[in-house]
Image: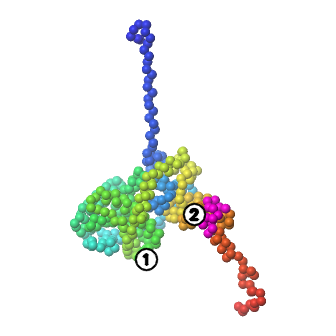
Amino acid sequence: MSEYPGSAPAPTAAPATPAVPEPRPATLRQRLAELRGPDVAPHPLDARALAALAANPGCGRRALLDGAGVDKTALAAALGSPAPFGQSQFAFMRGNAFEARVKADGGTELLRLLHERTGAGSPAPMPGQTRVPDLSAAGPEGRVARTALALREAAEAAGGSEAWTLLVHPLLALEVAGSPAYLEPDAVVVRPDGRWTVVEIKSFPMIDGSADPSKVGAAARQAAVYVLALERVAARVTGSRVDHSVLLVCPRDFSNLPTASVVDVRKQLSVTRRQLTRLTRIEDIAASLPDGASFDLERCSPAELTAAVDAVGAAYAPECLAACELAFHCRGQARSAGAVEALGRGVRGELGGLTTVGAVLAAARGESAPGAADDDPTVVALRRAAALRAEALEPVPGGPGSVPEGAVAGCR
């Protein structure tokens, strides 16, 4: 009712419409969890996986799947291309026995090898006087904290003394795409001068002082991941520094006796840093996926998983067969598309703009090939090679073993 008789009722103000907040963009971790499946725990990354990423930095498929924590072994099986590779039980037991021998007696033999290879100017480790701290703790976070504390204590003990410290299977953490990756090197040695050295123990032999270059390269990439994680800890400890050379311990010749070699991992360390930086921008790769794409193994059909995987670009090479669970699926794709990548990175680099086997064969036959002009050096070389091959295969007049006209066949 109005205040004065006969007056019109006062107009009622319309209720204010509540402002609808703009949707906030999902964080990277949320987006990766959606791709993996909201009820699926992330598959943990380890040093081998990060080393494989560094070996093939151009593969967006592996970068996204590893960043999202997708179990690639289960995914490959769901796609119908399981990866039948891995270490045999015999090799696993042999490796464990060799590692136990190297670390026996408080790591006496290991420290002797380290001092022999890199210990110039440092006091030799005395048997029985090496510190071997207990690194056991509850859960991975507890073990990471205990490792960091042991490294700090070792650095303090090393100052002005001759103390050596051996950390057996320490646990380090490295943030990858917003999630922690827990890494466990075989050993880390803290020297009296404050240097920290990563030790990699492998069961492949070192014959006449050298080992298989491909296996040494894989070990170097894996050790570089440990060095990178160790640098994060060393940055918080005064007076400590991490060696960019690691000690690789292997069986000598065909025996079970250990020998060692120093491996410089600066190149692998640089590549790993760049790749991990690239992993922090995998939201760009995830944003390119079609709506509804998911790698949820519990909810998606094989056809849906295949479509989601194929929507992410891959950089397949034959070397992937020894390092990636999805390699057989990617190889099948490369072969069906006639991609030259299936023949190896070296062949791919030599062929320039010719990206398919069909285009290469067409160029060699003298036909126009997509991706390269007729005067392209690659096309010219292919045609020259085809001409030389045809000339070499041209049948000899008279056939093999024929006697020229007018000649007399000799006795046989």
Span colored in magenta: 368-381
Label 1, secondary structure: give it: loop
What numbered label is drawn on residue 378?
none
Contact between labelled residues 1 and 2, with CB atoms less than 8 Å apart: no
Determine if residue 256 is in view. Answer: no
Q: Is residue 127 left or right of residue 317?
A: left
Residue identifier under label 1: 207
What numbered label is drawn on residue 352?
2
Label 2, secondary structure: give it: loop
Quarter of the figure that contains the N terminus: top left
Which residue does the image show at 42% across and 70% down from the upper left?
203
Amino acid identity at mark 2: Gly
Is 338 colored magenta in this rendering? Answer: no
- Seen as rendered, the residue at the extreme top is 5
Tell me: residue 248, above or below residue 151: below
Closer-to-camera residue (85/344): 344
Task: Please rate how many residues cluster around mark 1, counting C-alpha atoms within 10 Å: few if below 14, some from 14 to 19, many from 20.
Answer: some
Q: Main secondary structure of the magenta part?
A: loop
Q: Is residue 411 left or right of residue 64?
A: right
Amino acid identity at mark 1: Ile
